[in-house]
């Protein structure tokens, strides 16, 4: 991947991807960020050595790739200001991290520009362990696809989806998933405390169990998740008793209901913006 990458926005996701690129060996001089206020920009410049500016137009003018890392509700205003810099130049690849704004809508706001990729990352990107779902506008060239993969890799793992609707599914399965896992962990810690454990010990135990389980799954790709679950479940044993209680409470169904609600909301947002 060659050329300058300009990030519009200086929030968590912009910082995660920009920081990952610099950490992976990209020259800081090839990474720039813009935002309305200098406080976050100064912090990123001090930490990463990248260029910063409060002018979005100045930021993207010499960029080969533009990453839109702003909130959906300000995207229209942002792209209206940048249309002359991006929309009139087919030489720029545009990557959007915003939820709910389709490729077609982004293209419309950019005066028909078609070199667009949508990202749906999640917050573990902040520590380089993110998962990003990606959808490319039809007809995008191999060089653009590789550039998108390089940027996504800077914050963790990535997958391409075949249809744009699947980005909403990625939102449910990954984008919002840290909150689900934190809720489950929170309930487990609360149970430990209710049984007399101190909060720190309960949290340490729950975190250790969660991290170990994820790493075991990651290092056992030849096994299904069901097989991994069955390997720690003896019929009539303690784990079996817990899983039976979860099933009686319809935990699997509740989880699927939550995922459907998340996906439906993501689809609704596409209509709003």
Image: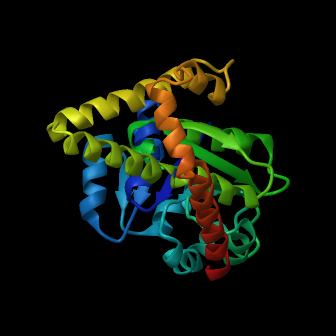
Q: What x and y, as percent, mark residue 152? A: 57, 42
Q: What x and y, as percent, mark residue 195? A: 21, 40
The image quarter in which residue 238 lies:
top left
Horizontally, residue 177 falls left or right of residue 190, namely: right
Instruction: Give the residue at the far front of this rendering.
Output: 236
Q: Nearer the viewer, residue 36 or 165?
A: 165
| Residue occupying image coordinates x 46% and y 68% | 56
| Residue occupying image coordinates x 25% and y 39% | 192
Q: Nearer the viewer, residue 158 or 86?
A: 158
In the rendered image, which quarter contains the C terminus?
A: bottom right
Using the image, determine if residue 120 lies above or below residue 1.
below
The answer to whether one can see residue 201 in this image is yes
Instruction: Give the residue at the far right of this rendering.
Output: 139
In the rendered image, which quarter contains the N terminus?
A: top right
Horizontally, residue 109 falls left or right of residue 139, namely: left
Q: What x and y, as percent, mark residue 197? A: 17, 36
The answer to whether one can see residue 93 in this image is no
| Residue occupying image coordinates x 64% and y 62% | 260
Horizontally, residue 27 falls left or right of residue 225, namely: left
Horizontally, residue 103 falls left or right of residue 120, namely: right
């Amino acid at each position: 991947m060659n050329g300058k990458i300009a990030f519009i926005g200086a929030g968590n996701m912009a910082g995660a991807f920009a920081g990952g690129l610099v950490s992976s060996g990209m020259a800081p001089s090839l990474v720039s960020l813009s935002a309305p206020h200098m406080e976050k920009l100064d912090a990123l410049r001090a930490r990463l050595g990248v260029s910063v500016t409060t002018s979005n137009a100045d930021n993207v003018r010499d960029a080969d790739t533009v990453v839109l890392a702003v909130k959906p509700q300000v995207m229209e205003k942002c792209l209206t200001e940048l249309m002359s810099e991006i929309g009139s130049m087919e030489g720029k690849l545009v990557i959007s991290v915003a939820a709910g704004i389709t490729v077609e809508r982004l293209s419309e706001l950019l005066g028909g520009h078609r070199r667009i990729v949508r990202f749906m990352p999640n917050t573990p990107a902040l520590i380089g362990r993110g998962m990003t779902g990606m959808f490319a506008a039809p007809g995008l060239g191999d060089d653009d696809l590789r550039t998108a993969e390089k940027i996504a890799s800077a914050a963790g793992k990535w997958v391409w989806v075949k249809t744009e609707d699947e980005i909403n599914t990625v939102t449910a399965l990954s984008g919002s998933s840290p909150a689900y896992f934190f809720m489950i962990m929170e309930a487990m810690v609360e149970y430990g405390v209710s049984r007399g454990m101190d909060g720190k010990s309960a949290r340490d135990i729950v975190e250790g169990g969660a991290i170990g389980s994820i790493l075991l799954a990651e290092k056992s790709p030849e096994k299904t998740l069901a097989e991994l679950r069955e390997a720690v479940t003896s019929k009539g044993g303690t784990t079996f008793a817990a899983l039976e209680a979860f099933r009686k409470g319809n935990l699997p169904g509740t989880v699927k209901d939550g995922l459907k609600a998340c996906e439906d909301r993501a689809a609704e947002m596409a209509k709003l913006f």
